[in-house]
Image: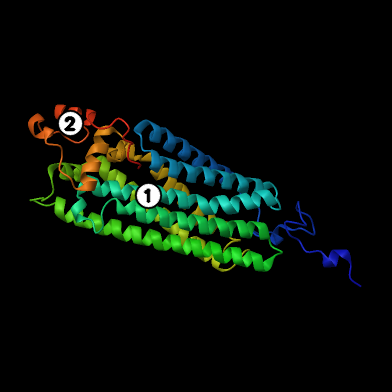
Amino acid sequence: MSTPQAAFRPSYDTCSVITALCPVKATTLGYFPNQGVNIFVAIGFGIAAIVTLVFGVWKRTWGYSIAIAAGCILELAGYIGRAQLSANPWNGSAFKTQIVAIILGPTLICIGLYLTLRHIVLALDPSLSRIPPRAYPLIFVPADVSCLVIQAIGGGIAAAAGRDKVDLLQNGNRTIIAGIVLQVVVLGVFGALSAEYLLRVRRTLTGPNPSGNEDAVALWADRRFKTFLYAMAGAYAGLAIRCVYRIAEMAGGWGNHIMQDEPSFVVLESFAVLIASGLLAAFPPGVFFPHMSHSLAIKNSRRTADTGSAPATATATAGTATPGQQTEGDSSSANEKPANEKPEAV
């Protein structure tokens, strides 16, 4: 004779707290998340978001800073959710929050990386790039947004399914994996193009007889710019490691042994993304690579390089200006532009 207890199946719909019938092993994670670690990571993302926004407003690097800060805020929300799961692993709303937020946060942070390559190409030597500089954000940002949308759909389906709607849960899982795989492909193409371009620049601008212009040679030798490049490379590596880990984690389905191993999640997801965000916040382009700023002088020089047009002839009589400076002729030329001209978006 069956009893109500024998027919009971623990799920986020039937369980609200840990009991003998609702053990922690029956949850998707299968463990009590470490509260101290999750609070630490949440605080780290909160600090990274604030620092990024402060430097973004101060140095006028709008698009870059908004994308990274938004990703950090999503991560903050996700780890607050995991901290709540530390007290009660059957907290359904916290579980759904951490699924969606932690999956989507790194995708927004990647947008900040994608926005840098165009400005690096414009500042060094556009002629060495395989594609026009303006094409970089037009290719990679929509591709990354596509990853974001696919993962958001999958995360929403999985969060709504819980553990008891197996078919719906698997469909959400497959959708998330598809979005992450696409993100790995986009990251790989971006990394390959960036590395190939920088190697070409290195061959051109270094050596006893560098063939680049003086401004590009000076920028390539600048310690702050090199530091910025190393920070971007470190952030890229952290985000790539996280994406590869996520594929392995999701491939086994919800509640698989990788998903229920907290140390691997902390190292390959939490700290990998936190280190990437910390590098991007600690080495802001407004300080280490001012060419990404919306300042008028930088915007005008960027537009000239992006379109391939020659500088205004007024500069020939006023003298040559260094990057970030404006000659008398440049100033008068800028004043003659239409008043309703809008600044170019980063």
Q: Is residue 252 visible?
A: yes
Per the image, label 1 sits on a secondary structure element best described as helix
| 280 relative position to 302: left or right | right
Disc number for residue 330: 2
The residue located at (24%, 37%) in the rendering is: 300
State how many labels appear: 2
The residue located at (42%, 33%) in the rendering is: 54
Residue 113, placed above or below residue 196: above
Q: Amino acid at mark 1?
A: Leu
Residue farthest toward the bottom in the current orientation of the protein: 1
Residue 253, placed above or below residue 279: below
Based on the displayed image, in which of its 4 quarters is residue 11 positioned? bottom right
Q: Position of residue 302 (x, y in %)?
A: 24, 42
Quarter of the image containing the C terminus?
top left
Q: Nearer the viewer, mark 1 or mark 2?
A: 2
Say which of 309 and 251 sits in front.
309
The residue located at (60%, 44%) in the rendering is: 80
Q: Position of residue 159 (x, y in %)?
A: 64, 56
Q: Position of residue 64 (x, y in %)?
A: 39, 43
Q: Amino acid at mark 2?
A: Asp
The residue located at (84%, 67%) in the rendering is: 6
Disc number for residue 307: none
Say which of 129 and 288 sits in front.
129
Disc number for residue 113: 1
Per the image, label 2 sits on a secondary structure element best described as helix
Residue 248, placed above or below residue 263: below
In 3D space, how far apart are the residues under numbered discs 1 and 2 (Cα atoms)? 31 Å
Say which of 33 and 298 sits in front.
298
**Within 10 angstroms of label 2, few (less than 14), some, or many (20 or more) residues?**
many
| For marks 1 and 2 on the same chain, the one whose residue lies earlier in the sequence | 1
Based on the displayed image, in which of its 4 quarters is residue 335 positioned? top left
Quarter of the image containing the N terminus?
bottom right
